Amino acid sequence: MRSFTAEHAYGADIPFSPGLNIIQAPNTSGKSTCLQAIIYALGLERSLGPQLTIPLPYAMRERIHAVESDPYEVVLQSFVELEIENSRGEIVVLHRDVVGAKDSRLIQVTFGASLSQDAPRSRQRDFYVLDGGSAVQEDGFHRYFAGFLGWELPIVARYDGTECPLYLETIFPMLFVEQKRGWSTIQGPFPTFFRIQDVARRVMEFLLNLDVAQFRRQRSELRNTIAELNHRWTNERNKLAEAAARIGRVRGLPQQPSAEFAQDSQIDLQLYQEGEWVPLSTLITEIETLVSELEAAQLQTVDAVAPQLEARVATLRSQIDTESAILEAVRSEYAAETQDSQAMGARVRSLEVDLRRNQDAQKLQRLGSELGKASSEHVCPTCHQGVSNELLPTVEAVGMGIEENIAFVKSQLELYRSAQGASGERIQEIAGRFRGVERNLQDKQKELRSLRQELVRPGTSPSRAAIENLVRQQNFLAQLSGVDDLAISLLDELKAIAIEWAKTKDALARLPPRQSHE
């Protein structure tokens, strides 16, 4: 340590030996100053508290004298230098100004034993401390210092949900004992202003090299990966469900990724066609066959096909009437199911409110509240006088207690939530049937208009009904093929997500069981 005035140079040199070092001297001799100087040279003053003031006495900051009888001299320049050696035999000297031209946040590192051996200071580098990034950025001193020590600082959780390294300031209170506190406890106070969760336990796990810290980190990373995969699954699943909803419905697609889906990723896209659910692949094959037959058929005149056209018109009229009636019935069914679902949703919300109130009442009762209990015993909760219940009917049944109420409401919630989920699936199924019936009705209406126009054309003209039917079937086939191609692409992505999810879940299951103190 050096402190310079206009007339004198003051200082102290403290040698160290490998292992435990004990500094012993009479009171007010500067033992705490020596320790604080080491902490200051390492940029670790925040291990003593959140204040950024220099943790050194006025002899290093403001004024100094050799003996008490001498007048004080103003400190014009002062600094601390510390020589350290790591397990690899590398030696560096740290220089940090206290008073001087350079900012106190700058630490100059000289490579080599220039302090103990008076070697030339040829290779040097500057680092910064007490500023954002000093623990993670390349020019941050604490990142360099952790590497010099051979430490790989673990990433720990903060109370706000973010993560940060286990800062060196939180570790060093375990590495020195200061006299003022050492009489009561060896361990220094851990800095809590970094907002690190359970900082004392994290430091002990790191210093003792406990596997629990590594397992906790791995467990956290694996859970984050699972959450991300679930999010990706939901996005891709929604895309597939929306594509299927344009033509019908999808079956066999789980809400969440599973190991079963990773091994056997089979889904079933279905369309409501002619009163029944038909697999998409089957319908595509049938339409492809129909298109091939229509393309190979010979064109005929209107007179030649008139009887068939008239018969088809009569059939279409009957089918359109039937499809219209079915469409109205499905529409009414959809409206009724939607109303039931909304009623169940309202009931679920009401039960949730009821559950919260019962739980609050239970909490108040556990804390010793007498209000609810007094009123139930016909005692006024305010004046504590008896309350007559003559206006109430006399019944022998006893009401349920709070615990029974909570259990009952929870069972009701589970029941109604399950019913609401089933209702949602029924609504989707009804919507798929509605789209299928509506599509069939529109196709038949278009075909009927086309046949009516065909019947009023000249008899010797070639029939266009077959051509128009071919175009309709080709367009329908193109729509189905587009959905099928998209489904195959999304299915491949979902399978990849499920495989990665299963591997991550397996890795999480292989970790040791979580300890209660974690």
Image (tube, helix red, strand yellow):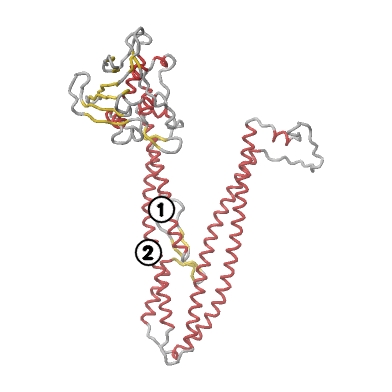
Residue beneath label 1, please?
261
Seen at 40% across and 47% down, the residue is 228
Contact, mark 2 vs mark 1 (Cβ under 8 Å): no
Q: Give the amino acid at mark 1.
A: Phe
The x, y position of residue 115, in whole percent, is 22, 20
- Whole-angstrom CA distance, mark 2 to mark 1, is 20 Å
Residue in front for this viewpoint, 160 or 256 = 160
Q: Give the amino acid at mark 2.
A: Asp
Q: Is residue 476 left or right of residue 418?
A: left
Seen at 59% across and 56% down, the residue is 341
Q: On the rendered image, what quadrant is the N terminus found in?
A: top left
Which label sits on residue 478? none
- Badge 1, how many Cα within 10 Å: few under 14, some, many 20+? many
Of the two numbered discs 2 and 1 in the rendering, the one whose residue sits closer to the viewer: 2
Quarter residue 207 falls in: top left
Report if residue 214 is visible in the image.
Answer: no
Report if residue 110 is visible in the image.
Answer: yes
- Badge 2, how many Cα within 10 Å: few under 14, some, many 20+? few
Quarter residue 87 falls in: top left
Residue in front for this viewpoint, 384 or 146 = 146
The x, y position of residue 90, in whole percent, is 22, 26
Q: On the rendered image, what quadrant is the C terminus found in?
A: top left
Residue beneath label 2, please?
485
Residue 512, compared with residue 441, is above or below; it is above
Q: Residue furthest right?
A: 390
Residue 136, compared with residue 188, is above or below; it is below
Residue 444, compared with residue 370, is above or below; it is below
Q: Earlier in the sequence, mark 2 or mark 1?
A: 1
